Amino acid sequence: MASTLQVDRVSSALGAEVRGIELGSVNAESTQEIERLLWEHQVLFFPNQNLSNEEHVAFGQQFGELQGHPHLENDQEDQRLFILKASRGGVADEWHSDLSFLPSPALYSILQMIKCPDLGGDTLWANLYLAFEELSPPLRELCEGLSALHNAEPHGRPETMCIHPMVRVHPETGRKVLFVNEHFTRRIVELSVGESAHLLAYLYRWISRPRFHVRYRWQPGTLAMWDNRCTQHSVLNDFEGERIIKRVTVMGDQPSGLKPKWPPYARPVGPSDTSRHDRMLEGFLQGSNTLSED
Ligand SMILES: [Fe+2]
């Protein structure tokens, strides 16, 4: 099986194009090989697939349970398949891991390009192993002892919240990952609002460094599959013309990392802006206990 696949890396940070396989008719052996390649390269691109909706769903199901988008409208008969048409705006042009505001965020996203815009509309992915490993040792140690609150505010659902370790451990590779993203992460639980804002701003800028990235130019019929546990992605919202994609999402497990070294830092007193953000965290902590224990 492995010998029939042609695998070409497309950047030094992450990503590979894979040829020599028809994803509409994979078996258990080829599914395992694809997953092994995905753990190695983090995002895979399969040109010239042109899967039907049924084939796309069936391919996704090889890797686990599928879930439709929890907040965005979907007019498909099969809610597990999400189709997005955009001619300007309406795409996720901030860095993010899919559905990180859920207790068990998306595991794999599997996206096929249906119609490319006339110009632009590339997608970028970032390698979150490298983003963690290239921090200085003191900052790595600090981040490992922290957790962060994520919510679905970009979808107009700020009440959908979750706390995850800031550094998660990938269950298959055992490597550590910097797990905060500018789209869904709101604040660091154990720091004050101001400290959290500055550290997150630094980390978002750090993750956006091109040395951690692959930038991919799409062709119609290309299917991309990525591991949300160790990558973030962002669509370049620069395109001219219509861009149509379809996607299925394989659901994941609860992120695991170290337990936070400190208690939450929330002081819900007074009418200030600071206390408003602290009240959000305090309210969430009183209402749930979703932080991973290991
Ligand atoms: Fe996304």
Image (tube, rainbow, N blue to C red):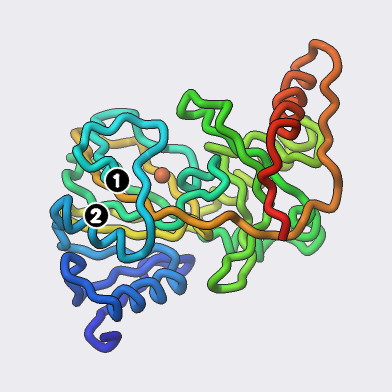
Residue 47 place in picture, x, y as percent: 20, 63
* Residue 262 pos. (x, y %): 86, 47
Q: Where residue 98 appears, x then y in whole percent?
A: 46, 46
User: Which residue shows up at 29% across the image and 85% down it?
Assistant: 2
Residue 91: % across, % down: 35, 35
Evaluate if marks 1 and 2 touch, with contact meaning CB atoms under 8 Å apart.
yes
Q: Secondary structure at mark 2?
A: helix
Relative to 263, 2 lies left or right:
left
- Of labels 1 and 2, earlier in sequence is 2
Q: Which residue is denoted by mark 1 in the rendering? A: 80
Camera-side residue: 286 or 121?
A: 286
Tell me which residue sits at (53%, 45%) in the image. 100
Residue drawn at 23 percent across, 59 percent down: 58
Q: Is residue 85 left or right of residue 250?
A: left
* Residue type at numbered disc 1: Arg
Which numbered dot is residue 164?
none
Q: Which residue is mark 2?
A: 57
- In the image, residue 185 above or below residue 156: below
Asked if residue 160 can be seen in this view, the reply is yes
The amino acid type of the residue labelled 2 equals Val
Mark 1 → mark 2, Cα distance in angstroms: 7 Å
Say few, some or many: other residues with alpha carbon within 10 Å of mark 1 (under 14 / 14 to 19 / 20 or more): some
